[in-house]
Image (cartoon, rainbow, N blue to C red):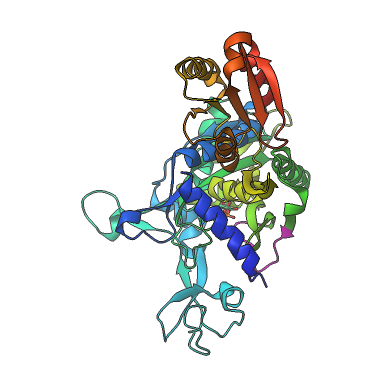
Amino acid sequence: MTHPKSGENDRMQEIISLCKRRGFIFPSSEIYGGINAVWDYGPLGVEFKNNVKRAWWDAMTRMRDDIVGVDTSILMARRVWQASGHESAFTDPMVDCTNCKNRFRADQVEEMSGDPNVCPACGMRGTLTAPRQFNLMFKTYMGPIEEDAALVYLRPETAQGTYVNFQNVQTSMRKRIPFGIAQIGKSFRNEISPGNFTYRMREFEQMEMQFFIPPEDEENWYEYWRAQRWQWYLGLGMKPESIQWHEHGPDELAHYARVAVDIYYHFPFGWKEMEGVHDRTDFDLRRHAEFSGKDLTYYDDINNRRYVPFIIETAGGPDRVALAFLCDAYDEDEVNGEKRVVLRLHKKLAPVKAAVMPLSKKDELVALAHQVHDEIRPIGLTQYDETGGAIGRRYRRQDEIGTPYCVTVDFDSLEDRQVTIRERDSMTQRRAPIAELRGLLAAELA
Ligand code: GAP
């Protein structure tokens, strides 16, 4: 049972309201009353999510020789989804309430209402229908005529775009197995029970990596990628006690997976999947070979043998992962008797790296503060703030969005060409020469 306690609900509400107030995340189409399970990222949110994606992309591609990246299209031939099994099997069991007409995922009713026979919306007992399978793929039509022949799906996972390009990538990049292909991009699922803010959306992004291996190395690479993905979260400051493994039981496995494990995060609304590592065997390439009639085997010229590669997949989503980092970073403490909200985000993930503030609005200070700000712009997104009253209040505003450094220009700065650097977490302050500031901050943020 993962019923949120009221304190946990409050925590989620505080995070949602912070996201709205400070320009991280807004409801989509809000002025028209919103659209269910679709969210927009504001100026700070887009920076933050881009930082999550960049950290993943760097770890997966730039820091390694054995993984390359692609960016494939959302619309693909319908045959792709017939081959992959999604057209027939990418379904969730759905129940309807005959009283209030709401629909729910059958496997989530108990979690939502506390009883598998009670409707989570109207609370009536015995009004839920028997489960039936509902396909989660969004349909649209290619070209001007809406007919079955023109039907295409919005992709529900990025993985298939990678698989159908396996040979293009392998030959153009002259890659030898084992090697991987990483991709970040939009996916769409017509979720029956979306919710919990950006946790389960109908339009979202995925960051997925497909690692192609010889069949006999399945176990080793599966273990290897489990360990790598776990470490990635810890390396970006996620608390070890916030994550745990969840092995998929036979009834949880996706149609393509032989074994799978999730990294669960302890969200305010319970322990939930954040990312999965899947052993997809040779299922996908075999099916694409069968349906396309193309030979998708790999020739191993060292051992002089030909085989269909097996695939270990790591599959996460930047929206869900960003939400987990936000929840993990959210903290409240007390400074001078006042509540301080602080996002203790890892420096690599923080949307704003430093904020420059003149102590007063006096012309000389403002001019120097602008110079200092221009000087440090190359370190990442920075802000200039001469409003907002007392310096303490301006520090708090930056704490709330996770800015690691505040740089204050005061009257002494005019004489000694030094500024005060104040740190978000320790709240300690130190003086540093303006001439060295950019290098110093860049080194600390690296
Ligand atoms: N290619 C395998 C695959 O798609 P998945 O477990 O269905 O596996 C992978 O999805 C990841 O994508 C999830 O762990 C989650 O981070 C993200 N994701 C999936 N559905 C989502 C949704 N409705 N909203 C936000 N993120 C989602």
Name the residue at the bottom extreme: 126
Question: Residue at point 61% right, 59% down?
Answer: 11
Residue 385 image offset from top left, x and y in percent: 49, 29
Name the residue at the left extreme: 144
Residue 68 image offset from top left, x and y in percent: 59, 30
Residue 237 image offset from top left, x and y in percent: 71, 41
Question: Residue at point 45% right, 17% down?
Answer: 363
**Quadrant occupied by the C terminus:** top right
**Quadrant occupied by the N terminus:** bottom right
Residue 145: quadrant of the picture: bottom left
> Would residue 174 be visible to someone looking at this image?
no
Residue 426: quadrant of the picture: top right
- Left or right of 388? Residue 419 is right
In the image, the segment drawn in magenta is: 246-257
Q: How many marks?
A: 0
> Would residue 271 be visible to someone looking at this image?
yes
Question: Residue at point 52% right, 90% down?
Answer: 126
- Say if the magenta span includes residue 256: yes
Q: Is residue 271 above or below residue 226?
A: below
- Say if the magenta span includes residue 407: no
Magenta segment main secondary structure:
loop
Residue 150 image offset from top left, x and y in percent: 29, 54
Q: Is residue 37 above or below residue 360?
A: below
Q: Is residue 170 above or below residue 39?
A: above
